[in-house]
Image (cartoon, grey):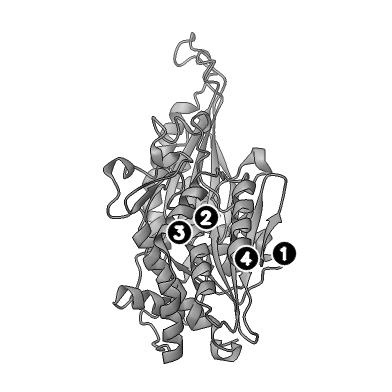
Amino acid sequence: MPSETRQLPLTAEREQWYAAACARLDAERLKRLLIELIDIPSPTGAERAASEFVAARMRERLGGRACYQPISPDTGNAVGEIRGSGNGATLLLYAPIDTHLEGDPVRDLPWAGPVMRADMIAKGYAEGDLVIGLGAANPKAMVATLIEIANALKEAEVPLTGDLQVGFAGGGMPVNIAERRNYGMSDGVYHLLTRGVAPDFAIIMKPVPRVYCEEPGMCWFKVVVRGTLGYAGIARGTPGYRASIVPAARLIEEIEAWIPTYTALSTAGEIAPEGHLAAVRAGWPEKPAFPSAITEIYVDLRCNPRTSPAAVKAQFAAALGAIRARHPEIDFDFEMIGACPGGMTDPANWIIQSARRGWERVHQRAHGDPPKLGGQTDGALIRRLGIPCARIGFPSPPKRCPAEFREGLGGMGVVSIADLVKTARAIIYAVVDTLTRPRNELGL
């Protein structure tokens, strides 16, 4: 994978267009829009209000070419477009719009932490350059920034040859919300890209301030440890009684010890696929006198795009087989309950190289090889659908993030407006570089 960027300086005319668009970026307008977005709850599978708001805002600012794309009564996508003069490429700027938390203490606590911090609540506010609130960084900052980019290009009257599409989808979080039609795992972007949005290239905005040409997938497993239903009043060692919870604890330690080996063996290219034990379920909390016959362990293994989910399943099965050989007393089985393959774009593809040139222009240094990535996004599916896609992002949390919001993942809810404007300038470079050329100059 090449670490050097192919240099192709902008012409004097494109430099003028680029400068004009960057000059129209309005940090205060971006901040206001971001706070408005944070105030509209958009948990996975219930994004309708946020998407309708975004579609209306784009209609207002982009001259009418924007729409809400309904999927169900509770969710839908938003798409806006600036048409070019013709014979150019179509470039999609994309971000998901759903948050990983509900913003509701009844639903989120205690699993998200002991209290609902300010970065976990769907109420945005600013402290100087920082904006705080649920999803302020991910995903609401990405949505607001891409809209601001479209605003700037429209106001600067950059003469685009190709078409610029700006799209936002629900269901982007790596979750499966049963009560909302099992929504999540890139459901929204799949609908977006099979219902009329079919670009030549895409740029997805996400955290991490580098350009990536590949992203991991993910494989979910449920491990079931079997015992018998018990009763707290019987003596330990009573014939016929087998615990499930304590043996599950041993199994958890064994799986946790194996995961670093999996990561090391699966690391390649830009990807270092991690894995985590995410949930354990057993018994009735209201019946502690009756130990559960079943304990379930839930595991997420990230999947290098060079490795299929079936291959990951085989590796996990082999690891559990070795654990079974060491602990024949534990009765357990497993199943795969979710699988999304990773996705790759040729690093020599136009959009990757253009995004790198934009990044280098803004950061004033060579891009080089980015740090290894483990986070899964809709970008994997975009690539699997055959659309060359570059991922570009911003620092999260920002350097000036208050210490109280640095503990754990939280609500992904602190972002620096200056960081967003800097990323916007890099993306605008790629837009001008790409959409002011005829198709044949882009390898199309």
Q: In the figure, 363 relative to 222: above or below?
A: below
Which amino acid is tagged 1?
Arg
Q: Between disc 1 and disc 3, whose residue precedes?
A: 3
Residue 194: percent from left, percent from top: 70, 65
Gap between marks 2 and 3 measured at Cα? 36 Å
Please report contact status of discs 2 and 1: CB closer than 8 Å, yes or no: no
- Residue 26 visible to an observer of this rendering: yes
Q: Label for residue 29?
A: 3
Residue on which disc 4 sits: 80
Which amino acid is tagged 4?
Gly
Which amino acid is tagged 2?
Met
Gap between marks 4 and 3 measured at Cα? 18 Å
Gap between marks 2 and 1 measured at Cα? 25 Å
Residue nearest the observer in this picture, 288 or 252: 288
Residue on which disc 2 sits: 218
Which amino acid is tagged 3?
Arg
